[in-house]
Structure formats: structure tokens, C-alpha cells
């Protein structure tokens, strides 16, 4: 956001954000101007800080004349939630539109949440770029420095955000902005309390996988779906599943991630995981489950009316699935269950609706991921091109291998005192 006071963050909020792997919890995006909610934004920002939420608000005056800076893009990337305040003049600001593109990118690739506020503008106007938004794009398209591809990216981002059903302040009668800001703050607090699964900061776009799996799972539909993601170890199953989970989580009050089922079941028994599932969804203390059959009955009888988002990570045997989800009607209508496994055979049962085989990365993706870990950049340093290509050949498209080799090279460079 380019129109505000300087960046602030409460100490408590900063600690929470940092511990969760993010620098900020909320990124506020808005445009200052005669049509823009300066008072409302101040209400909202101050309320968040007072509640201990680590919020980012940029100062436009410090940025005038500067190129759109990496620091601002990084702030968006390192925020758990982005809140664009879409006013009548929002689309006339190039800065706002660039921010919005970055928000949508982070939403798609990392599952970060966007919570738009439609302030004196209808969601349909944002979604279809009509009215004042259409006029703004008429001006953008006349300026030769904005090529067609960039303008289309801005339009696509507005279409995505315009479809998110969050807050329409325009439709509120007798609105009281201070009260509304408090409601938004409370909703943000509720969202921040949800379990958000951390993923590596060094990610490479996997849109083709994400889109295919999201279609399989029926995102946005009321159908209960069980889908499986399978592939060899180190191929990125868990990371991809976490990104899907994060992207879906805003539609669910009940979310549960059961991690490393293969090892947990060996060490503590499947009853431990049954207990975890029940206690997380019902928000109760752990119960005394004596055996698998008792756990199965408890899940069926206590969770049948709960719409649940459930991620079962690294499942090894079919009986693991039977003990935790069994059939679709064990959980409430609209539930989504994601299973990751190395064993494709366990997914070939009627209860699993679809399965997706995760393939290795191509050369360009491998090079980018390796470079992120080895050089903290998207491309290798010139003097390391040969080594980078050899590393990619060894890794054979496996993300885990690329991360390990890249991190090892980065560590070796630091140890030898080489810096770039």
C-alpha cells in the first residue's frame, strides 16, 4: 500500500509472525485520495496493532519516484493475510495493481489468504472492470509504457479478488466505520488462530499441479471428496498438499493436518492419530481410545456432521485410511480429504475419488529451485553454471535433492568466505 503512515508492528505481533515463518500477519493495501477510506483504514490499522496483530502499512511519500521495490513485494510475500481495500480509485493506482498481482500470486502458489474489502464499489465492478474501474483501465491502456501483458495481469488479478466473498461495505446501511473495522479485526484474529501449514520460502511455481488437484478436489463445491497425491519420496507431495490445504482452509472452520502417518503409526499406533483427529476437530482434550475399532466408532459418531478439511500425510497402508476416514459419510457434507502416499495401490479403492501422480521438475524449474537454495536467487551465478547443471542432472527433478544439494553448496560457499 502506498498511502499511509510509516510501517509499524507491535512487538507481540512481530513475535507471532516471526514464529510462524512470516514477517507480518497482515498486509493492508489501499489508495489514498478523495474517494479513499483514510479514516476507516486508520481505524482498521490501529485496531489491529492494539490487538497485537503485526500489520504492514507502507508510506507512499517515502516511495515517490522510486521503482516498485523488492522490499514491498517481499512484505506481501511474507504476510499471512492480505487485505486490499478496494475503493473507487483503487484501479487507477499502478502501485495498487502491482500489489494485487503479487497477492494473487502468493494466494495461488502458497495458499496465502486474501480478504478484500469493497469500499464504495460493487464486487461486480471490480470483477468485470466496469464503471470507474473500466475508465481506469482505459487510461492505463493508452499509456505506452504499460504493455498489454501487464495490463492483462492487472485485470486477471482484479477478477480473482472480485470473486472472493468477504466484506462489501457499500451494501451496508447506516454503516459505522469504527464498528465495521472492529468486526474485520475480529475476523482476522479468528483466521490467524487457524492452523496454517508452513512451507519453504524457496518455492518454484507448480501451477499445473495445483490447478489439476484443485479441480479434482472440487474446490468451492459442496461435494465431499477424497483425493490422493502419490509419487516417490522427495518429489514434493507434502509441500504440494500443504499448499492446497492452505488455499482451501479459509472455507473451513474445522481443519486438521495429520503429519507423518507412516512413522507415527509405527511408534504410537493408529489410535494416537484417531485421538488427534477427534481432539482437533471437537476442540477437546484427548480421549482414552483403547483400540482402533473404538477410535473408528468415535470418529463416525462424533464427526459425521462436521465439514472438515483433512490432510493425511505419508500414508503407507490402506488400513490407515480405513481407520481415519473410512467412507465419505464419516464426515460432514462438503468435507475435503487429501492423502499423500508413496504407495499408489492404497489409493485404488472406491472411497478415493481421484488420484494424482506428482512428477519431477523440468530443467527450468529445477534450475530455479536449486538457485534459490544455493544462491538465494532465481538463477545461478555465472561462475557456478557448470556445477548447477551437474547438480540438476544428479537430482533428476527431485525437489528434495535439489534443496539438499543447493543448501550444501550455499553452506560451503559461506564456510569458505565466498559471498556475492
Image (tube, rainbow, N blue to C red):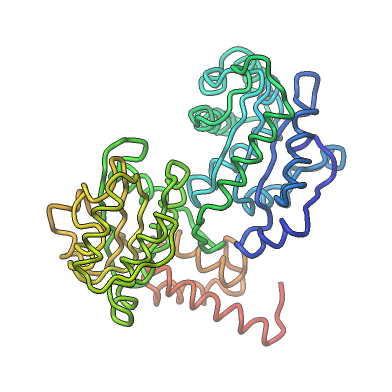
Q: Is residue 172 above or below residue 22?
A: above
Q: Is residue 82 at least partly visible in the picture?
A: yes
Residue at 19%, 57% in the rendered image: 326
Q: Is residue 65 at least partly visible in the picture?
A: no
Q: Position of residue 35 (x, y in %)?
A: 76, 19
Horizontal relation, residue 234 to residue 413: left or right: left
Horizontal relation, residue 346 to residue 282: left or right: left
Residue at 57%, 46% in the rendered image: 190
Q: Where, by quadrant of the figure, is residue 307 drawn?
A: top left
Quarter placement of the N terminus: top right
Q: Is residue 198 above or below residue 227?
A: below
Q: Nearer the viewer, residue 167 or 69?
A: 167
Horizontal relation, residue 198 to residue 68: left or right: left
- Outermost residue on the front side: it is 288
Q: Position of residue 310 (x, y in %)?
A: 35, 55
- Outermost residue on the right side: it is 61
Q: Nearer the viewer, residue 306 or 48?
A: 306
Q: Nearer the viewer, residue 21 or 266?
A: 266
Amino acid at each position: 500500500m502506498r498511502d499511509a503512515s510509516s510501517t509499524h508492528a507491535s512487538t507481540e505481533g512481530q513475535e507471532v509472525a516471526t514464529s510462524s515463518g512470516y514477517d507480518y500477519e497482515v498486509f493492508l493495501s489501499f489508495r489514498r485520495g478523495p474517494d479513499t477510506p483514510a479514516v476507516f483504514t486508520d481505524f482498521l490499522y490501529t485496531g489491529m496493532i492494539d490487538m497485537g496483530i503485526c500489520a504492514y502499512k507502507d508510506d507512499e511519500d517515502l516511495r515517490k519516484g522510486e521503482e516498485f521495490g523488492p522490499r514491498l513485494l517481499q512484505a506481501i510475500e511474507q504476510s499471512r493475510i492480505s487485505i486490499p481495500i478496494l475503493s473507487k480509485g483503487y484501479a487507477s493506482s499502478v502501485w495498487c495493481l502491482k500489489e494485487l498481482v503479487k497477492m494473487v500470486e502468493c494466494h495461488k502458489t502458497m495458499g496465502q489468504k486474501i480478504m478484500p474489502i469493497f469500499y464504495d464499489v460493487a464486487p461486480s465492478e471490480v470483477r468485470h472492470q466496469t464503471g470507474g474501474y473500466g475508465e481506469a483501465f482505459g487510461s492505463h491502456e493508452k499509456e505506452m509504457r504499460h504493455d498489454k501483458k501487464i495490463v492483462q495481469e492487472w485485470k486477471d488479478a482484479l477478477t480473482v479478488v472480485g470473486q472472493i466473498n468477504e466484506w462489501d461495505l457499500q451494501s451496508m446501511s447506516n454503516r459505522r466505520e469504527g464498528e465495521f473495522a472492529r468486526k474485520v479485526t475480529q475476523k482476522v484474529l479468528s483466521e490467524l488462530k487457524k492452523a496454517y501449514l508452513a512451507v519453504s520460502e524457496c518455492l518454484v511455481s507448480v501451477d499445473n499441479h495445483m490447478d489439476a488437484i484443485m479441480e479434482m478436489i472440487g474446490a468451492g463445491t459442496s461435494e465431499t471428496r477424497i483425493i490422493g497425491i502419490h509419487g516417490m519420496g522427495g518429489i514434493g507431495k507434502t509441500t504440494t498438499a500443504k499448499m492446497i490445504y492452505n488455499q482451501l482452509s479459509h472455507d473451513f472452520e474445522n481443519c486438521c493436518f495429520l503429519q507423518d502417518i507412516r512413522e507415527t503409526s509405527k511408534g504410537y499406533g493408529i489410535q494416537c492419530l484417531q485421538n488427534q483427529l477427534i481432539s482437533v476437530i471437537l476442540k477437546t482434550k484427548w480421549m482414552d481410545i483403547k483400540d482402533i475399532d473404538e477410535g473408528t466408532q468415535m470418529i463416525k459418531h462424533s464427526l459425521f456432521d462436521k465439514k472438515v478439511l483433512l490432510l493425511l500425510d505419508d500414508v503407507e497402508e490402506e488400513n490407515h485410511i480405513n481407520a481415519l476416514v473410512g467412507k465419505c459419510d464419516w464426515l460432514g457434507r462438503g468435507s475435503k480429504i487429501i492423502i499423500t502416499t508413496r504407495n499408489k495401490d492404497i489409493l485404488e479403492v472406491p472411497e478415493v475419488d481421484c488420484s494424482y501422480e506428482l512428477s519431477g521438475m523440468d530443467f527450468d524449474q529445477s534450475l530455479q529451485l536449486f538457485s534459490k537454495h544455493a544462491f538465494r536467487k532465481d538463477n545461478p551465478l555465472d561462475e557456478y553454471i557448470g556445477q548447477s547443471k551437474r547438480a540438476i542432472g544428479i537430482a533428476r527433478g527431485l525437489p528434495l535433492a535439489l534443496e539438499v544439494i543447493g543448501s550444501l553448496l550455499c553452506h560451503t560457499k559461506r564456510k569458505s568466505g565466498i559471498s556475492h
